[in-house]
Image (cartoon, grey):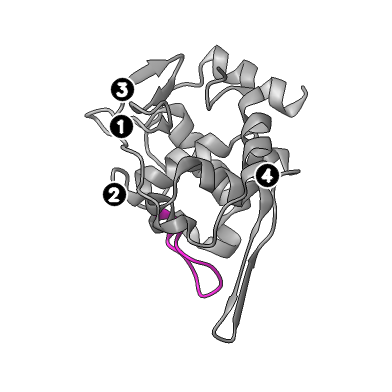
Amino acid sequence: MRKPGSPGAVLAILMLTASVGWSQQADTAAAPDTAVAREEDGRYFNAEDIPTFHIAEDGTVDWRTYSGYRRYHSECHVCHGPDGEGSSYAPALKNSVMRLDYYDFVGIVAGGRQNVGGGHENVMPAFGDNANVMCYLDDIYVYLRARGTDAIPRGRPAKHDDKTDVIREDENACMGT
């Protein structure tokens, strides 16, 4: 079985999500636990084998949470506001990600989402072809979950773990470098 953080997992998840689809009610699903159940090469997972964050007692964040901060602010904050706080244009993802199932989150980011009703039309474009999002989607997810639980404050994390060789290899494989 592919692990959620492996490069091939993104494609497998996209295919699963595309075949099953997701409902407009996806953001009412129960959020998975954020407690770390295991660590593998600098990547942290909860008991359900879903990516999660790790914050050391001194405030040092794991690499993926730090990377998620960077990727979120390069690709997502324009619509969803700095630090996942939302804007007048799009909702606060730090809140939405706490209600979404991990796989629904991946599906929405990859395939986009359209909500129409009450005189409003909200459209999130699909990012499935954007390697700068899809190769770092787990990073963005764990960053938003850390923000959603208030495990980290607003702003750039002051201290972070180093990127592991395995994470670097996974990034290179996904980006085709």
**Distance of label 1 from label 2 (alpha carbons):** 11 Å
Q: Mark 1 points at which residue?
A: 55
Q: Nearer the viewer, mark 4 or mark 1?
A: 4
Q: Which amino acid does label 1 sit on?
A: Ile
- Which is nearer the N-term, disc 2 or disc 4? 4
Residue 50 picture location, percent across and down: 43, 31
**Distance of label 1 from label 3 (alpha carbons):** 14 Å
**Distance of label 3 from label 2 (alpha carbons):** 19 Å
- Give the residue displayed 44% in from the left and 62% down from the top: 92
Position of 45 with respect to 124 (left or right) is left
- Which is nearer the N-term, disc 1 or disc 2? 1
Foreground of the two, 93 or 9: 9
Residue 161 picture location, percent across and down: 41, 24
Q: Name the residue under label 4.
A: 18
SS class, disc 1: loop
Q: Nearer the viewer, mark 3 or mark 2?
A: 3
Farthest-out residue, bottom:
119
Q: What residue type is labelled 4?
A: Ala
Boundaries of the magenta span: 85-94
Q: Name the residue under label 3.
A: 37
**Distance of label 4 from label 3 (alpha carbons):** 29 Å
